[in-house]
Amino acid sequence: MTAIHPPSTRVWWKQPVDRVELVWIAIALVWCLIMFFFMPFWHVYGNQNYSGEAYRVNPDQFVAKVNDFVSEYTVRTETDRNIPVVRPPAGSDIYLLARLWQWHPVLELEKGQTYRLRVSSADWQHGLSIQPINLNFQVLPGYEMVINITPTESGEYAVVCNEYCGIMHHTMLGKLYVVDPAEDA
Amino acid sequence: MSFEINREFRTCPKSGLVFHRPAERLIKANAVVAVIFLAVGGALGLLVALTRWPAVQLLNAQHFYTVLTGHGVVLLLVWILFFEIALLYFCSSVLLRCRIATPRMGWLAFALMLIGAAITAIAILQGGSSVMMTSYVPMPAEPNFYLGLILFAVGALIGTFIFFGTLVIAKDEKTYEGSIPLVTFGALTAAIIAVFTIACGAIILIPTWLWSIGYISEIDPLMYRLIWWGLGHSSQQINVAAHVSVWYAIAAIVFGAKPMSEKVSRGAFFLYILFISIASAHHLLGDPGLSSEWKIFNTSYAMYLAVLASLVHGLTVPGSVEVAQRKKGHNKGLFEWLRKAPWGNPVFAGMFLSLVGFGFIGGISGVVMGAEQINFLIHNTIYVPGHFHGTVALGTTLAFMAMSLWLVPVLFQRELFLPRLAKWQPWLFGIGTALQAFFMMGAGTLGVSRRHWDIAFTGSAFEWAYPGMAYTMMALNGISAIMAVTGGMIFVVVIVGTVFFGKRAGEVSGWSLDRPDTLRGPAEALTGHGSIGVKGFPAPGTFVLAGFLMLIFVVYYFINYGYLASVWKFS
Ligand code: HEM
Ligand SMILES: [Cu+2]
Ligand SMILES: [Cu+2]
């Protein structure tokens, strides 16, 4: 009988399964397995992965580390709010702080170099969204996330907050510069 | 203490369904309240969409976040759960011709849900709880925000246990023979997942409430997200199990369609029970910590076995319709069965649009963005609301609307109000919502954030402009929202109109104390589907459609990994 009636008395599981269903289940299963194994495959052969490296951190201590970092490597300030632009050595540990409602500081990185980006929040949850490449990470207070990033294109990038963090959330916009190594020499 | 058990039943002359009087009252109450909340939530949705249309930006920032919190809570939790409780009572008491277990507890559940929803709604309206439905700590809401949700969840849990109790009584009093119908089996799947879901809700919301009133000093934000999504994600799986059941039910009601194979369909529901609840990890793919092994195993529901289940239903539901149509003589070529389907019947049209929309829009986008690495391109962009309007608005809500257009006249023994207007309903809502999903996904691909009042970043220290196309997409989203909300308003008018002003049905059935006949499946053994279809495939048209879906799925999946390969390297 139909789906809103009991099936044929008791032997319904003996009904032969149609070929159409069997073929489809086989196709679907193969696709599911491909998708499953593609993720570990990308860990081995792809270049865009997050290792899961993170540390518990006290927000105040993280802020202190960011401040040290900023005072050591600031090269100039921007806008009438004097926001520091920081140019850390290639390959070093770099810090980015999310707080209501700023990204602190502005980073200036070298194309093709790999940095250990350490990011956390001083207060609520925020979202690290680098535009226009559209890479997105969750930022949590109490957790220091470590991402080894290698910018592959030079240019000017926006750092948008894309986790709702209160009334001025839409003003939480930062900058990130990627410069060609040649400029330096 | 003992109560007289009410044993009044009536048999609907049109559908042959048997209603137990207290069950009927409970189903009516839950369904009507659900529709009222749908109306409220839909209005809030329109305000949200018009604010996110950059040239309109209707509300100010403060009101926007309040309204968005309301929209999420009212629709995702309140509308859907009230309707699902009605559905659980229907699938147990009505489909099994059984008296409902403990109707008084049913009213307690109803009251708790209503009071809880009201408390949370008031907390949101007062403006101090604009924390979004996810209420991520440590951003605080008013204590009543959490308290209302807890009461609501307790009510829903009681309703779920009434469903289990009714199944037990039906077995005990032998109201049916053999196995429960497929649709009831699907509802059972939903109910089992619901228990897990609500347990997660309690585990996280009770401490959060205590935190908000000062009894607990700190809630770990990562732990909060992990457990909250045990609630937030699993509840979507309740919805999937419930709306798949509704698809099967509507195929049965409109076409007399039989499941192609009981074994396959039930097996697929069973996979949901086993695997679906672990996938909450796909909400944490961009979070600090958490190992990749854990993420991969969980985000894929252990090798995508629950996705497999949905792919199976995606074939067997339309397949059962195709088989039924072919048996009726629409057996020519691949698609005669579809061309000759009753597209003017909103019950069928709604169900079919829900099925296609859920599969092609919600399903594909969901699995793709749940791939561990692709998620970095999509996390927290407006692509995410685009995806889940494909699942929860186009899939679940439209399926429930279609079910209501059939169920409400049967329940209230009235004719559908304004039936000619009702014909437009699924098309306006379905196409409007599909377009909305599509445009939000498009804007998200261009980087636009979700939950964001102003994509021009007015007032910030720096400037940044999204591509013009992103603005266009957000405007088109607003226009599509107007279309969807029109469809939603028609639904509410038709349903409320049916309840209060619908013409009395020609033949009305009265209550009787006679025990309804025992439900029996047909005696003959089930066999194959005979000679219909093409080349031994009883549902070749469905197979071709499913193959088309698979093709898009595969291509879209690799396009995303291809784009990912072009961005910055990170490890
Ligand atoms: C037809 C009416 C609808 C319209 C116009 C609409 C519009 C929208 C828009 C534009 C957003 C994204 C806002 C943003 O992130 O900035 C949104 C979010 C959302 N919508 Fe809808 N929607 C509708 C129906 C529904 C339905 C039927 C459901 C659920 C059953 C639903 C559930 C949600 C949820 C849960 C969110 C996320 C809220 C959050 O981020 O916390 N919507 N809606
Ligand atoms: Cu923020
Ligand atoms: Cu989920």
Image (cartoon, coloured by chain):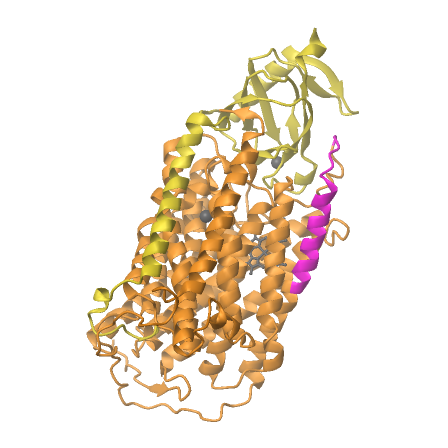
Is residue B209 among what the camera can see? no
Residue placed farthest to the front in the image? Answer: B535
Residue at image coords 54%, 27%: A120
Residue at image coords 55%, 17%: A114
Q: Is residue B79 left or right of residue B431?
A: left
Q: Is residue B316 magenta?
A: no
Residue at image coords 21%, 79%: B523
Residue placed farthest to the bottom in the image? Answer: B506
User: Which quarter shows the N terminus of chain B?
Assistant: bottom left
- Answer above or below: position of B90 versus B279: below
Q: B110 and B232: which one is in front?
A: B232
Instruction: Pinpoint residue B259: horizontal percent, then vertical percent.
Output: 34, 68
- Answer above or below: position of B45 versus A176: below
Chain part drawn in magenta: B461-483
Q: B426 and B34: which one is in front?
A: B426
Count all numbered tags in the image, as a single digit. 0
Q: Which quadrant holds residue B289?
A: top left
Q: Colour of chain A?
A: yellow
Q: Is residue B235 left or right of residue B124?
A: left
